[in-house]
Image (cartoon, helix red, strand yellow):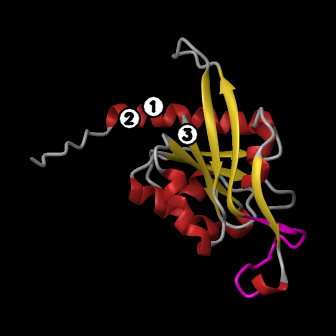
Amino acid sequence: MKIVIAGGFGVGKTTFVGAISEIEPLTTEEYLTAASAPTDSLDQVESKETTTVAMDFGRITFDVPVVPIPVELFLFGTPGQERFLHTWHSLAHGAIGAVVLADTRRLDASFTAVAYFEQLALPFVVAVNQFPRAHRYSADEIRQALVLDPGVPVISCDARNGTSAASVLMTLVEHARSARFTEPAVLDMRP
């Protein structure tokens, strides 16, 4: 099953994929340069030195109680900058759902990902990456700030921790499974 890991610049997508992947993650990290300074704000992420320019890829296998065989999840991390949005369509194609990773210090950086997956009608969860010294908000406060539908799960996580990342992915798989059975099917009526 294909999963997209998305969110704004510097929210922890590469870290999330690396923390949980059972294989060495494929990354497309490049060093930030002075040329990107006008477009890549390092506000609240001053120590960031690299950025994803195409995607991150990882894989994890889970035993899911409702499925008789182990389930492989293929994780595709998106670049965070808006200039790379053209890659998101390819990464989202065929996905069962998405994780929108959020940073409460820069919550506005999540709007693009939320809007994108809402427009695609792709089930998603919002995982609030708990950065040190970042203010903690309740799930309801995050939901209100991001103008999320009541059915979108909002959970906290530590992208550096594989157990935390696994919990996020299991929440997404369950959410995607339930969304699949509650949303009406769209039939192609073309001749």
> What are the residue bounds of the magenta stretch?
37-52
Q: Which residue is mark 2?
A: 180
**Residue 59 percent location from the top left of the image:** 69, 35
Residue type (three-letter) at the residue carrying disc 2: Arg
Q: Residue extending furthest right?
A: 47
Q: Residue 56: horizontal and vertical position, in percent?
A: 70, 52
Query: Does dot 3 land on a helix, a strand or a loop?
Result: strand
Image location of residue 181, percent across then percent down: 35, 31
N-terminal of the pair, mark 2 or mark 3, is 3
Callout in the foreground (2, 3):
3
Residue 173 quadrant:
top right
Please report the residue visible at 52 percent of the width from the left and 31 percent of the height from the top: 174
| 10 Å crowding of disc 3: few (<14), some (14-19), many (20+) | some
Quadrant in the rendering for residue 142: bottom right
Residue 183 falls left or right of residue 69: left
Pointer 1 residue? 177
Circle 2/circle 1 CB separation < 8 Å = yes
Badge 1, how many Cα within 10 Å: few under 14, some, many 20+?
some
**Real-space Cα separation, disc 2 to disc 3, in angstroms:** 15 Å
| Residue sitting at the far left | 191
Q: Is residue 45 magenta?
A: yes
**Residue at 75% from the left image edge and 37% from the top image edge:** 21
Residue underneath mark 3: 2
Q: Position of residue 157 (x, y in %)?
A: 73, 45
Q: Main secondary structure of the magenta part?
A: loop
Q: Is residue 84 above or below residue 187?
A: below
Q: Residue at x 76, y 53 (%)?
A: 27
Closer to the chain start, of discs 1 and 3, is 3
